[in-house]
Amino acid sequence: MATPTPVSVLLPTMHPTDVIADVARQLQFGDELLVICDAEDDPVARAWPTVETEVDGELRLVVAGQPHGCSGKANAIAAGMAAARHDRLVWTDDDFHHPPEWLDELRSDYERRGPVTEPPVFEGRDPLSIALEPLYAIVGTASTVDVGVAWGGAVCFDRSDLPDEAAFEADLQRTISDDGLLTDVLPNVTGTKRPRTVPVGGSIRASLERHVRFSQIVRYHDPVVTVGLLAGLLAFTVGSLLFPLLGAALSTSLVGITYARFGVRRWTVLLAFPVFLAMLPLAVYGLLVRSTFVWGGRRYCWHSKFDVEIVDDA
């Protein structure tokens, strides 16, 4: 049996979460797990090392430093890529369960398909994020497979897949969305049919901030699509007001089919029609009304794709 290509797994987190141990146990000889935080006094740095069991690969803590002109997540990924020793890279997050076969499946997927990502299924934890689950299914889950959008929670690629790695790392340090930028430079990323359930929200305010961030990611990474979406939402809203039964049937069917494709069994499919009617005002709110948003304890003002201002610590 051929020796698998070693991988560097990048895991940005500020806390000593169980995900660190879950991923560390999946490392093979030659692999490494880089746990990336902002500062030496972050909880995960104070608790390091957080994995007490013996693992086959190597664990390292990377202190990225405070971001300047970019998001904390993008800054962490840039630091992790600079510190990683291998060319085969896996990005992941600390907010979902990583089953024992998770890393091997991503590794095998890359060998067969090249750059690959898994789709997230976002499950709400507050009234607003629960209500928005049908929207998340269309623009978050299905887009990884249908459009080739990379999700930073589970993506595997090689440095050789990047047109210009140095430019990519530099761009990370002057933007917000790490996976939005990766999608820009990896147009051939393939989405798997293995969804990962990600709990989101927790409060209506947190869900509003998340919605604003997602809206602006689409705006700055694909303005043409943004215009098309707004036009489509306007047409759907007008059509649904004229023919409500047809609008309800179409929206509920679309979300129901999407849920079925990814094995999602959530009663929120019944919210598809009212959520679709609310999408136009929600888009206007995220794109035109709000000029800042909060993410990971920082408030950002995103002036353009590569012009990010950190307003303050929220």
Image (cartoon, grey):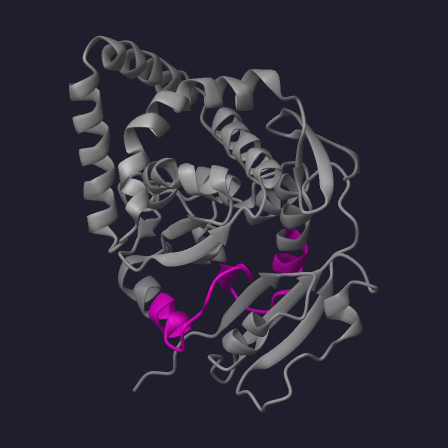
Residue 187: % across, % down: 37, 41
Where 66 sits versus 85, above or below?
Answer: above
Residue 300 coordinates in the image, percent (x, y): 70, 33
- Would residue 90 be found to the left or right of residue 107 on screen? right
Count of numbered labels shown in the rendering: 0
Residue 224, can we see it? no
Q: Is residue 158 magenta?
A: no
Which residue lies at the image location 79% right of the left edge and 49% below the top edge? 66
Q: Residue at x 25, y 38 (%)?
A: 255
- Relative to 188, 64 lies left or right: right
Residue 124 shows up from this direction: yes
Nearer to the camera, 18 or 60: 18
Q: Name the residue at 54% across, 28% down.
A: 216
221 left or right of 258 in image: right
Q: Which residues are magenta?
A: 78-107
Which of the 4 image quadrants contains residue 170?
top right
Residue 178 in picture, x, y percent from top left: 56, 45
Q: Residue at x 21, y 21 (%)?
A: 247
